[in-house]
Amino acid sequence: MNARVALPKGTAKSLHRSLRVYHGDKSRQPAMDAMYARFVKPGQLAFDIGSHVGDRISSFRRLGAKVVALEPQPGCARAIRLIHGRDVNVTLVQAACGKVAGEVVLKVNSANPTVSTASDDFVKAAAGAGGWETQVWDHAITVPCVTLDGLIAVHGVPAFIKVDVEGFELAVLEGLSTPVAALSFEFTTIQRDVAYACIECLQDLGDYRFDLALGESQEMEFDKAISADEMILHIQSLPHDANSGDVYAVLQT
């Protein structure tokens, strides 16, 4: 699973850019840490599903949490090993996450690996969409796929799960059969239907309430728990150029 493979042309340059964006600006860290401190306490376990170059791993570790990180892209996984490889409290699994264990085909965007995806529908939704005109998925690799249930069986129940997998979020959540205390999943305005389905999936698991942060703002829109129906209506109301954000779900006790 960790064997070195040839990377698509341009990957090194794009990874260096990602490292500058996500690790180079230290001013982003306090807001990020304050956001995740609502959900993750020292000594607890967090899952980072779709780690990219690991800035969320870094935040969870600054908060004193243990981390299981999933990243299927070889270049991104190498970057995570360079940053966190000696940290015994970080476990990297070089795999995708989905509804069933096995393998999936990952569509790689060599120029912008943060939007690489296992979802064909995501690529189709981006075609011709405003703001997505320059995105090209120019490479495909077959990668291992695990489930959240499988990760929990091996590593234990996390206090928080972050899911950011470019349109494959529903498949990830469908691989979870028991509710966890809190989680987040990314949504995009080109695939609002995926967000609605994720919310409904979580409601089938337990009594969740929701909030939302747009883009990389690290600021909650409501700063209170709202219902599934209210969150769906809010996402429906967002303009196209809101582009993306993260829905946060907290289990009611």
Image (cartoon, rainbow, N blue to C red):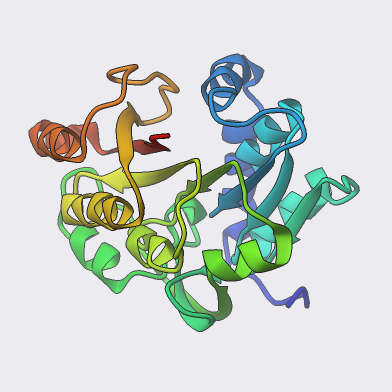
Q: Would residue 66 be found to the left or right of residue 196 on screen?
A: right
Residue 11, image quadrant = bottom right
Q: Would residue 68 be found to the left or right of residue 120 on screen?
A: right
Instruction: Locate the C terminus by quadrant.
Output: top left
Q: Can I make out residue 8 in this image?
A: no
Q: Which residue is drawn at 63% across and 62% down?
A: 152
Q: Can I make out residue 107 in this image?
A: yes
Residue 140 x, y percent position in the rendering:
47, 78
Q: Which residue is drawn at 46% across and 70% down?
A: 98
Nearer-the-camera pick, 24 or 195: 195
Direction front: furthest residue? 253
Residue 244 x, y percent position in the rendering:
30, 39
Q: In this view, does 35 lie above or below 126?
A: above
Q: In this view, does 125 lie above or below 63?
A: below
Nearer-the-camera pick, 60 or 130: 60
Q: In this view, does 231 lie above or below 196?
A: above
Residue 239 x, y percent position in the rendering:
12, 32
Q: Is residue 77 above or below residue 185?
A: below
Instruction: Locate the N terminus by quadrant.
Output: bottom right
Q: Which residue is drawn at 13% across and 39% down?
A: 229
Q: Would residue 205 be found to the left or right of residue 227 on screen?
A: right
Residue 158 x, y percent position in the rendering:
62, 48
